[in-house]
Image: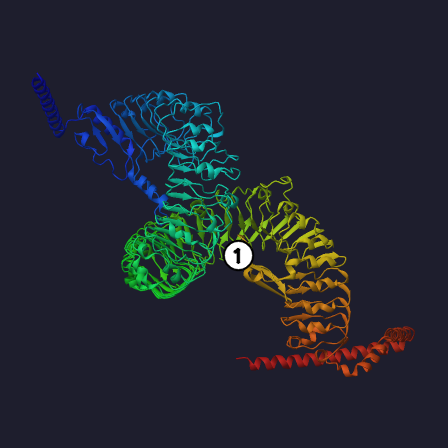
Amino acid sequence: MTKLALLVRGTAVLLCLLIFQVASTSHGQASGSGACIGSERDALLSFKASLLDPAGRLSSWQGEDCCQWKGVRCSNRTGHLIKLNLRNIDMEDYMRYYMYDYSDYNYPNRSRSLSLSAGEMSSSLATLQHLRYLDLSWNDFNGTSIPVFLSSLKNLRYLNLSTAGFSGRIPSQLGNLSKLQYLDISWNYYYYGNKSYILDLAWLPRLSLLSHLDMSYVDLGSARDWFQRVNMLPSLKVLRMSDCGLNGTVSATISISNLTHLEVLDVSCNTFRIPSQFGNLSKLQYLDVSWNYYSDVALAWLPRLSLLSHLDMSYVDLGSARDWFRSVNMLPSLKVLGLSHCGLNSTMSASISLSNLTHLEVLDMSGNNFYTSLKHAWFWNLKSLKELQLSGSGWVGSIPSDLANMTSLEVIDLSFNQLVGLLPNKLENLCNLTRMRFNYNNIGSSIGEFMGRLPKCSWNKLQELSVCGGNMMGNLPTWIGNMTNLSVLEASENMLTGPLPVGLGALGNLEMLGLSYNKFSGVLLKEHFASLGNLKVLELSYNNFSSVLLKEKFASLGNLKLLDLSYNKFSGVLFKEDFASLGNLEHLDLSYNNFSDFLLKERSTSLVNLKHMDLSHNKLDSVLVEEHFAGLLNLEYLDSLYNSLRFAIDKKWIPPFRLKVARFRSCLLGPNFPEWLKSQSNIEVLVLSNANLDDIIPDWFWVTFSQASFLQASGNKLHGSLPAQLPIKIVRLNLSSNSLSGSLPSELNAPLLEEFLLANNQFIGTIPSSICQLTKLKRLDLSGNQLTGDIMQCQKELVPNSTDQFGSDMLSLALNNNDLTGEFPKFLQRSSGLMFLDLSYNRLFGGLPEWLPQKMPHMKILRVRSNMFSGHIPKSLTSLHGLHYLDIAHNNMTGSIPWSLSNLKAMMTMVSQDTGDYIYEESIPVITKDQKRDYTFAIYQLLVVLDLSSNSLAGQVPEEITLLIGLTNLNLSNNQLTGAIPNQIGDLRQLDSLDLSFNEFSGAIPSSLSALTYLSHLNLSYNNLSGAIPSGQQLQALDNQMYIYIGNPGLCGDPVGRNCSTHDVEKSGLEDIDHMPSVFLGMSIGFVVGLWTVFCTLLMKRTWRAAFFRFVDMMYDMVYVQVAVRWAHMMEKNQDGAP
């Protein structure tokens, strides 16, 4: 019986196997013969027709058998299409690589993404009713909504629509997919706008079989019941709701008892209080609550998650959670712990003893506030640790020797701390190290000694070594070539010297080499790059490398994408062969060198992928023609500033590229306006300053560059007028120093405009009132024009404490050298950040306001000369502690000089050249040494000037003026100042020019004047000074000695030609001069009496009168004849001498 049963079972098994084999064979034959359900094939072809496929990813979708098409899978049993996978793996792989390897220089390439050719996705997919698996992720569906017809695919088990460029409301009909087990609708947006959203999650509980749900970056801010809805998914194992706008507090009464199978929970990047109910998720293995900004976090629930292996609480405020370590220390399965930027401080680590985290492999505590010695940290006994992230946490002292105990360590990051000294000795057991980052600490030793302490057993494993800003010196060690696995070497911002070691050329896996901001010197050899075929980024800027570039040096760098050799001393000619092998190069920076010629003509096709080329600040003087640019098909950034390049390009030429940034300052593009720029409609930044342009600005200029943000064409001879409408996106417009004319546009509709510079042109008319709408303005320069009318006041928009009004962002205002009238501009009361103000050479009147220091506390330069301002100098001016240039000359100011001038602290020291992120005018006129000079701002910043000349100031000069020891120019001339020159005037040691002329100073010239060793201009003329002129080497070297002291008859000494040894005689003579008024009075009376005596005699005696007039006539005739004869003789002589 038993045997019979066994026989029956065996027969049944054989029969089943036979049936299965026949079915398989039948299906295989069917497939091979092109068996594919026609309606489903037609649906796929219709779907394909609605798509744009630039990379040809669907090129296999042809022929009869759709089951063989790429991304398509059919059922072996029924032949129906059950799986459609159109995931863009190129984008996915890129993002994964990009997020974790910063050495890459790629950008996301959406050119391989599928997108829609029309408005909506084809609904033909609804025909695929047997579809179980649909993946459309990592494509770009043009911001359309997720199609509702997908909800009709009732057999779907897997649906992935993540990162597919959908937007708008997610359809609630997805709740009809009752068999769905996997749903991913995360990270859908359209260019950071139109984020996808859900208003109500009532449909979610109908997906009872769901085990994986990812709604990250879906806006759930309006779905208040999200916690309850999610709790109704009993099969859920993975839940990701990162950056969903979840906020507030979850009530403690709400249960999550149904989520008994949940293993992965990600609710990062929200703003809600972490609920204690999370402690009931007993099977949870992965928990990410990072970036939840909520204070007073309680962690009592955390120890109940005994299976937790991954915990990330980064950017959660644990500053008040004193039990954080006790709670974390009770998680025995923990392998990954993220606590970066949690507000942890030294008091939390001081009381910690041993740790129970014996399985911990990754610890991230970067960005905290420990500010204590690293040797006191609690984690040194974690021998299982593989990754230790401690950057930016204020650790101080040396790196402890306990580091040697971490024998499993692979990654360590101690960057941005205050650590000092070398690595500890005896690290020979750390053989697993792959990444070491020690950036921006004070290592303070030679790099050779530092690298010498790296364990030799890790040399062939180490992939990254970063020691930027480590205060290290010396040469790179010659044995660096032994680190054969190194992919990233960063040692920028140190003081490394010497030539590069040849061993660098042996690092065949190197992808990024950063040695900028050092003191390397010598030449680059081909051996330096011999085996660097994988190198993508090479940064050698800000060093002292020299020599000529040769093609063999870069011959092996076929994968190089970024080459930065700027700020060195390279020279010679740039030949086309030098770059022949750099076919993948995208970024080339050769600026600030000494290259003399540029020969890429005809063969520049090797740089077909180049996007960024910077040749500025060299000595290039080539003539560029169309062929130089023929192969630069992808060029977007071209900078040739400060060269002498001459463009000889046909005006009909259309470039093969579309520039976004073009900078041609000081290049010779003119005299005609370059027509080839007409095709560059993508321009965002255009610089044509000092480009020898002498032409009318063409009409197409404002059309082509209507979307530009930066237009600069200053220093040319351009003429014409401004358009009625400025470019709507313009941020900086500089057309200064041209010959532009006409009126300013009446409607200045440029809401983003920050710099509006039209100085030194020929604009006429008034300043339009619409200028008050430019609320973003930081720099306004209309100086040197012919503008008339009232200066703008912009009072209508004056709202106290408003930061979005005209003037509120103003840093610099120059309206000088026009013909403007009115009072001091009142809108400047909003300009709290103003540093430069020039209103000089206008017809402004009224007084200088007392509110200047209160409303403009950061003022550095104030010029209001040559106006009609009156009244006293405001004493409050001296509260402008940053003011180092004050010019009120040629006004009608009265009163005395305020004694509080000593409060001008910026004049009491050398001026700092730190101007922050502010760029001042390129050239500013200065009146000094009786001359007008134009200074660049680099020099202007060094000037400390006080000019109160040509006013009606009276009284004595306050002695406190001698405390302004930083002064380089002091001018008090043409006033009514009296008294003595301050005795301590010699304390102003920085003075280059001193003018006290045309006042009423009396007494002796202070002897301390001879201490002014920098003095090159001195004028004390026309005062009442007396006594001996001080001697001194600098005073005697001054030119025009006589004119320095003229008009002071009481002075003696060599400069005035009066010997001081006869001082008493001269003094007696001066006393006689005191009686001269009475002498002059007597002479005048005698003259009048004598004249009238003669006149009366002639009036009474007729014969005398006749004789007198005959005498006059005779003398007239005699003189006339003599003059006429001599004149005729001279004319004859001149004619004889003519050729």
Give the percent coordinates (x, y) of residue 748.
54, 43
Which quarter of the rendering shows the N terminus?
Answer: top left
Please indicate whether residue 363 sits to the left or right of residue 582 in the image. Answer: right
| Rendered view: 4 above or below 245 | above
Asked if residue 199 shows in the view, the reply is no
Circle 1 Cα neighbour tier, 10 Å, few/some/many (<14 / 14–19 / ≥20): many
Give the percent coordinates (x, y) of residue 197.
42, 28
Q: Which residue in the structure is indicated by mark 1?
A: 737
Q: Quadrant of residue 1022?
A: bottom right
Camera-side residue: 357 or 474?
357
| Rendered view: 846 above or below 309 | below
Please indicate whether residue 71 sits to the left or right of residue 743 in the image. Answer: left
* Residue at horizontal 50 percent and vertical 33 percent from the top: 298
Give the percent coordinates (x, y) of residue 402.
41, 52
Please indicate whether residue 1064 sits to the left or right of residue 811 in the image. Answer: right
Which residue type does callout 1 highlight? Ser
* Residue at horizontal 38 percent and vertical 62 percent from the top: 448
